[in-house]
Image (tube, rainbow, N blue to C red):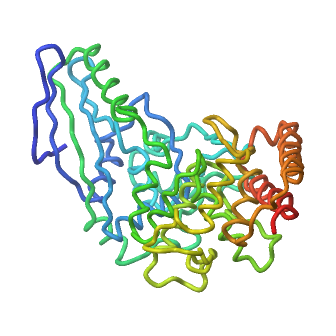
């Protein structure tokens, strides 16, 4: 690999290394893969991206967004044969190659679609057995045309979601992706293995991993007037999750239709919430939005965009602090949803007050607890509480339970 800039990383106790920095066009990255100039190391995980992830990456290039650079490490075998291993960036490079060759491999196992369960597939399947681009294309075409049930191979953009701004050839020639190229000053195989294993681990685990909530918070600043609402603190309750889901539910003309589709996995829920934030912060809010506008919720006594001082949020906090909705770390999503969906729906969206009758409150508590207890008797439910069906069931069950306890 060519390089443009370099730095020296070493101390007296560790293996010395040099790091070179640069960038390649996407066409150059494709050629490096097709010509086996870069390859996956034995310890790399398999491909886990979904079709929309691949399309999102391609669209990110078209929209000139920042794409994290690739990390390549040079290692030697028997002091002679060298390998340029992809230490960080497998998913991105696989996605780029998929777009170039116009195919997608659905690695999610169909037999258990609600779990994070994947085939152990990588691009090595198409690269190692085929020596030329022509052979690779023939291999892919044969796989796509295979009439087997649940064929994981298909064309990438069957729904035309990729925003085409130029020809495909121009796309690969004009877009660039950066790299860090690491070389250690040792031919000793054990030293190399220790160094690169530590490097791989550091890249993937160094520092405390951001929680989804922490990563998502960067989007809260897109529209300052909503920042305090999105970032509302409610006793271990992810308020924006409930705000988004109920906003979609409120906008339905048919309340039997499910909301938050395709959110059975945590990362899909995060994408759903980020889409909600983008929708709320759009300069020209679309009437076709599936969510109810924040302004249309009608928060009372809102001044200077301070949602914490609105009538609805004050009442919500009072109920959480003084009644029985105190959630500690580790409480299941089932408990939270059954107790929170209906509460937020009636307090925030319906602007109602909980009934001032202790006997009725006790009755409400018992109903909520019984519903949670009944749900937890279902082993299938406990295995997959985040499936869309169960989420929507909890939404409706919670609202129905609370209905008779507000005035």
Q: Is residue 269 left or right of residue 246?
A: left
Q: Is residue 113 visible?
A: no
- Res 154 → quadrant: bottom right
Give left or right: position of 204 versus 294: left
Residue at image coords 62%, 55%: 317
Query: Which quarter of the rendered picture does the N terminus lie within?
Result: top left
Task: Residue at 60% x, 57% y: name it.
Answer: 241
Q: Residue 342: percent from the left, percent from the top?
A: 76, 60
Task: Please say whether residue 313 is visible from this viewpoint.
Answer: yes
286 or 302: nearer the viewer = 302
Between residues 393 and 92, which one lies in front from this camera angle?
Answer: 393
Residue toward you, 397 or 365? 365
Task: Say which residue appears at 84% left-offset and 43% top-offset.
Answer: 369
225 vs 357, left or right, is left
Residue under the point 62% across and 76% down: 297
Q: Which image quarter is the C terminus in?
A: bottom right
Q: Is residue 37 above or below residue 405?
A: above
Q: Is residue 139 above or below residue 245?
A: above
Residue 2 on image: x %, y %: 15, 45
Give the side of residue 130 with respect to residue 71, left or right.
right
Q: Position of residue 383 (x, y in %)?
A: 76, 38
Question: Residue 372: where, in percent of width, then height?
Answer: 83, 43
- The mark total stands at 0
């Amino acid at each position: 690999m060519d390089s443009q800039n370099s730095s020296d990383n070493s101390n007296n106790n560790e293996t010395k290394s040099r790091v070179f920095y640069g960038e390649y066009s996407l066409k150059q990255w494709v050629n490096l893969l097709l010509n086996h100039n870069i390859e996956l190391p034995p310890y790399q995980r398999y491909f886990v991206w979904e079709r929309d992830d691949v399309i999102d990456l391609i669209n990110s290039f078209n929209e000139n967004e920042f794409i994290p650079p690739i990390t390549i490490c040079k290692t030697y075998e028997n002091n002679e044969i060298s390998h340029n291993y992809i230490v960080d960036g497998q998913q991105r490079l696989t996605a780029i190659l998929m777009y170039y060759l116009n195919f997608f491999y659905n690695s999610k196992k169909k037999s258990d679609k609600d779990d994070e369960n994947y085939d152990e597939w990588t691009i090595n399947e198409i690269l190692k057995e085929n020596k030329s681009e022509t052979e690779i294309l023939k291999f892919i075409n044969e796989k796509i045309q295979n009439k087997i049930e649940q064929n994981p191979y298909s064309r990438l953009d069957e729904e035309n979601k990729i925003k085409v701004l130029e020809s495909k050839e121009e796309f690969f020639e004009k877009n660039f992706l950066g790299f860090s190229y690491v070389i250690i000053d040792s031919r000793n195989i054990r030293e190399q293995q220790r160094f690169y294993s530590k490097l791989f681990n550091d890249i993937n685990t160094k520092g405390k991993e951001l929680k989804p909530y922490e990563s998502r918070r960067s989007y809260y600043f897109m529209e300052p007037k909503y920042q305090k609402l999105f970032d509302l603190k409610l006793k271990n309750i992810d308020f924006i999750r409930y705000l988004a889901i109920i906003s979609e539910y409120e906008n339905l003309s048919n309340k039997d239709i499910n909301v938050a589709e395709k959110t059975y996995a945590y990362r899909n829920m995060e994408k759903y919430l980020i889409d909600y934030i983008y929708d709320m912060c759009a300069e020209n809010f679309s009437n076709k939005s599936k969510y109810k506008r924040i302004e249309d919720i009608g928060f009372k006594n809102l001044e200077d965009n301070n949602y914490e001082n609105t009538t609805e949020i004050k009442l919500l906090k009072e109920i959480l602090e003084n009644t029985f909705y105190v959630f500690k770390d580790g409480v299941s999503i089932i408990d939270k949803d059954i107790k929170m969906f209906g509460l937020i729906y009636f307090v925030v969206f319906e602007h109602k007050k909980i009934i001032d009758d202790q006997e009725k409150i006790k009755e409400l508590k018992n109903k909520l607890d019984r519903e949670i207890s009944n749900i937890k008797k279902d082993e299938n439910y406990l295995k997959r509480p985040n499936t869309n069906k169960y989420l929507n069931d909890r939404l409706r069950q919670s609202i129905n339970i609370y209905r008779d306890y507000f005035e």
